[in-house]
Image (cartoon, rainbow, N blue to C red):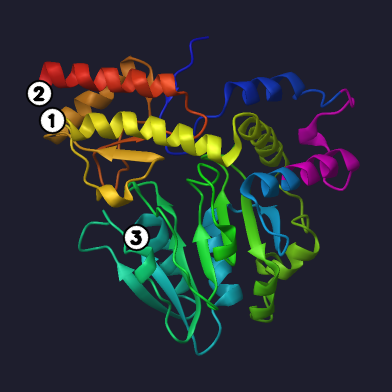
Amino acid sequence: MERKKNFFAGPSVLPVEVLEQMRDQMVEYNNQGISMVEASHRGGLFEDMYDECVALFKELLNVPEEYELYFLGGGATLQFAMIPMNFLRPNTVADYIKSGTWANKAAEDAELFGKVNYYYDGTANKFSSLPKASEVHPSANSSYLYLCSNETIGGIEWQDFPDTGDVPLIGDMSSDILSRPVPVEKFSMIYGGVQKNLGPAGATFIIMKKSLLEKQNPKLPAYMDYSKHSKEKGLYNTPPVFSIWGVKLVLDWIKKNGGAVGMQKRATEKSAILYDLIDSSSFFRSPVDPAYRSKMNIVFRLPNEDLEKQFVTEATKQGMLGLKGHRSVGGLRASVYNALPKEDVLYLAQFMKEFERKNG
């Protein structure tokens, strides 16, 4: 089979090595006479794999001892409501960085549970830039400050993070987790869907400083209560077994390929191929502030929408998928997550040069 070149923003490309491992062990996991995807989450087979997965995740991200890590269902979107339900306390505000679609959706949910203060609103610049991390300071009566580390639709990414002092910093890292080292100690909570850099869709990782639970609101529904999940290490109810197994295999692959530092090198090299081409061209353009360009999602435009449609059509014929920009903003987007081979990015770059030669 000749594999397509997968530039979708998510669910996204997985390492072929991982897909082959899942294929080979789908019916029988490690000669145990049973598949992992039919193993009970209360049985040793799954729990052993789960513990290994959590330990490896902590190792690769250098998670300090005072943090816990587990997985939940519901996607990152469930966290938009869970976070304010748990931590937006009465008579306080929650500070949100309004940086694009995903941070904005989280803020809209938070407004259902209390007062939201928009510390920064990128509407005026069409969500093409971010505030300087050193200049971000939470409100005096803030329960927490929330940001999205990488906006997949707008193609902007925090290059460093604010120091919020005693106010908890909470970050959605769905689309750039383990594409680089992260100063976990700056955050009280990091979470994200796994379907971009870590595995098959279905699971959401939670990394939480244990002391954050001391600031919880009382009387929460069982599944929406982080304390209950914490006590059961994420196994309060049946977890997304298949997705977590996939994450474990991807984490093995990341470790084998240099860990977070190795992934950062890959991301820098792959994104530079496309940004250098765009910046040297009068045909392609990037709408994103160069200081905050994402290394995961490269968004770009052509002189008109007809050319953009033609670009997507011709690219698809050449085996490149997912290059159409999000429907809310249009344009073009190439997602170059960890598992996407550098060769695929070079193939796209060559196609872009040829398309410009014919149509520029």
Q: Which residue is tagged 2?
A: 360
Residue 271 vs residue 265, the one in the foreground: 265
**Mark 3 and mark 1 in contact (Cβ < 8 Å)?**
no
Separation of marks 2 and 3 at Cα, in angstroms: 33 Å
- Estimate the x, y position of residue 188 in percent, counting from the top left: 59, 67
Q: Which residues are magenta?
A: 31-53
Residue 263 shown left or right of residue 304 in the figure = right
Q: Earlier in the sequence, mark 1 or mark 3?
A: 3
Tell me which residue sits at (79%, 23%) in the image: 27
**Mark 1 and mark 2 in contact (Cβ < 8 Å)?**
yes
Residue 313 shown left or right of residue 5 in the figure = left
- Estimate the x, y position of residue 166 in percent, counting from the top left: 55, 78
Tell me which residue sits at (18%, 38%) in the image: 285
- SS at badge 1: loop
Separation of marks 2 and 1 at Cα, in angstroms: 6 Å
Q: Give amino acid for label 2.
A: Gly
Q: Which residue is tagged 1?
A: 283
Q: Is residue 45 visible?
A: yes
- Estimate the x, y position of residue 222 in percent, counting from the top left: 72, 69
Q: Give amino acid for label 1.
A: Phe
Assess disc 2: are there few (<14), some (14-19) or many (≥20) residues with their C-alpha within 10 Å of its C-alpha.
some
Tell me which residue sits at (43%, 77%) in the image: 138
Q: Give amino acid for label 3.
A: Ser
Q: Earlier in the sequence, mark 2 or mark 3?
A: 3
State which quarter of the image contains the C terminus.
top left
Tell me which residue sits at (48%, 73%) in the image: 164
- Identify whether 235 is placed above or below 89: above
